[in-house]
Image: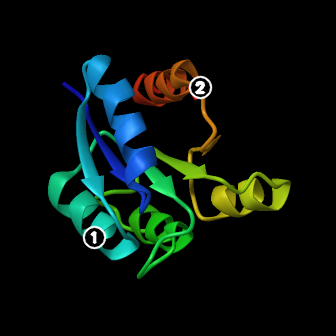
Amino acid sequence: MPKILIIDDSPTIVEMARVVLEEAGYEVLKAQDGQEGLESARKEKPDIIILDVMLPKMDGYNVCRMLKFDDKHKNIPIIMFTAKTSLEDEKTAKEVGANGFLTKNFDPNQLLDVVKKHLEGKV
């Protein structure tokens, strides 16, 4: 069962994503801030990370950058998950090594499609 780490400080968003992903057969891990997320990613070695941009303690861009520049974790797909929808945000996400970008007003099928594509390496 693939392991997905959701790093987001919104309990509502985390719960919605958790339900969708667990019903699809994924194991879901959660972290509420950037520091906790970074530690969880290093300890748990998830198959994919869904990462909010705006987080307490350390923003998602820094978490992504730190994981992507670490040889042990650089191959974990990271999907930036944010309420921010500007092209500048998508550009910054790519610059720090994110593999994808998903807005928080997501459709459950869209979330599943993005996760499946990245887990299968089709992106």
Residue where numbered disc 1 is placed: 36
Q: Nearer the viewer, mark 2 or mark 1?
A: 2
Residue at 22% over, 51% down: 45
Query: Where residue 19 sits: x, y (%)?
Result: 32, 29
Left or right of 25 in this view: 6: right
**Quadrant of image for the N terminus:** top left
Query: Where residue 22 sits: x, y (%)?
Result: 27, 26
Left or right of 51 in this view: 76: left
Left or right of 69 in this view: 26: left
Label 1 crowd (10 A; few <14 / some 14-19 / many >=20) = some
- State whether residue 49 appears in this view: no
Residue where numbered disc 2 is placed: 107
Nearest the camera: 118 or 108?
108
Residue type indicated by callout 1: Glu
Relative to 3, residue 87 above or below: below
What distance separates the C-alpha of mark 2 from that of mark 1? 27 Å
Label 2 crowd (10 A; few <14 / some 14-19 / many >=20) = few
Query: Where residue 78 sits: x, y (%)?
Result: 47, 48
Residue type indicated by callout 2: Asp
Left or right of 106 in this view: 78: left
- State whether residue 119 appears in this view: yes
Relative to 55, residue 73 above or below: above
**Quadrant of image for the C terminus:** top right
Residue at 42% over, 63% down: 9
Q: Secondary structure at mark 2?
A: loop
Query: Where residue 95 sits: x, y (%)?
Result: 67, 63
Relative to 29, residue 40 above or below: below
